[in-house]
Amino acid sequence: MIHKFENSKIWQHWPKHHSELRDGIYRGKLFKKQKTSASQKAVSDTLNLLEAELGTTDVRLAHSHMSADEFFESIGRIRKQLFMDERHRQNVHDVILEMGFDPEEIAYEPFRLRVIQHLGHENPRAAAVYYPHRDTWYAHPQCLMVGWLPLHDLEEHETFEVYPDWWDLSVPNNSEIFDYSQWVLDGWQLKIGWQHKMSGVKANYPQATSKVEVGSRVGFKCDAASNIIFPGGHFHKTLEQATGKTRFSLDFRMVHLGDLAENLGAPNVDTRCKGNAVVDYLHPPHCSGISNE
């Protein structure tokens, strides 16, 4: 079953039951709730990693006293720890629980650290970061739910925006170039963020193939450790930054296994990628699903 987008009030109050939350997400709604103990711990643990690795407590300015290569390599080490270490995987589990879901019904990926640098859009190697896209173009199912946690208080121009007019309209795109089995064939580095500085140029990142008049733009501001959740089927874009600071956030992808089996979710209007990323999610029990090799 698929749902049409309901244009009224895209941002919704967090419902009491996770079934209402999922249904709203499949209808194109976005949800935000204030920080919880789990989201605060996840953010605090990540900031501790950043401060130790970058050698400063002002991590948003760390790029200004490191070379580009040093910064890139440091971020790669942090991304690997977040993705692979059991305590950080447990943090995802706890965030999902405090969002109101039953983790025994959810398959999910570990945290990914997103790093949006000052004027990063001017770096050709980072171009793919700023492509408007649907996460479902990367071999995720239509019932994909994306969790997003900011590490700092952020204004609207520092986050991302969603284009709800395209919820059930086809975007001209080249998602057919993405084959999940080929993506992970030579290792899974691209799953946890770029760990080779030429990946942004050489890897196949789906994108719109012609200019799209995006229409309505829906953005948001948020406090550190807020809980954001949105449908992976939304056409959306990371905003370019010129604040002098780096924007750090955590995100994770998840699916409700029962809804996946019943083919619930956003309408598939233009996704033509190959493969199935869910095979490498962490499945209940949460410690299984992704190789540590």
Image (cartoon, rainbow, N blue to C red):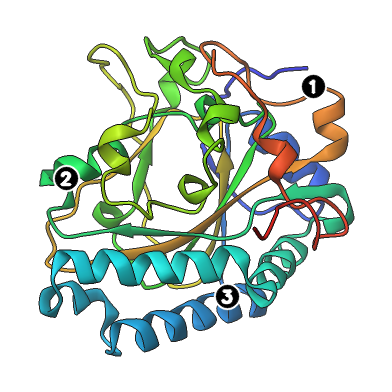
Disc 3 from disc 1: Cα separation: 31 Å
Q: Point out the tag, 1 or 2, that comes first from the N-terminus.
A: 2
Q: Residues within 10 Å of mark 2 (few under 14, many from 20)?
A: some
Q: Secondary structure at mark 2?
A: helix
- Give how far across and how far down residue 222 sits, in percent: 41, 63
At 57% from the left and 29% from the top, the residue drawn is 180
- Give how far across and how far down residue 125 sits, in percent: 21, 43
Q: Is residue 191 left or right of residue 131?
A: right
**CB atoms of marks 2 and 3 within 8 Å:** no
At 22% from the left and 15% from the top, the residue drawn is 211
Q: Nearer the viewer, residue 275 or 170?
A: 275
Please identify, in this view, whether the residue under mark 1 or under mark 2 is nearer the observer: 2
Task: Return the residue at label 3.
Answer: 42
At 81% from the left and 57% from the top, the residue drawn is 288
Q: Is residue 182 above or below residue 66?
A: above
Mark 3 residue type: Ala
Q: Point out the tag, 3 or 1, that comes first from the N-terminus.
A: 3
Which dot marks residue 278?
none
Could one spot residue 180 in this view of the protein? yes
Mark 1 residue type: Asn
At 65% from the left and 80% from the top, the residue drawn is 37
Could one spot residue 30 in this view of the protein? no
Task: Return the residue at label 1.
Answer: 263
Q: Residues within 10 Å of mark 3 (few under 14, many from 20)?
A: many
Which quarter of the rendering shows the C terminus? bottom right
- Give how far across and how far down residue 262 sits, in percent: 86, 24
Task: Return the residue at label 2.
Answer: 121
Q: Is residue 237 left or right of residue 96?
A: left
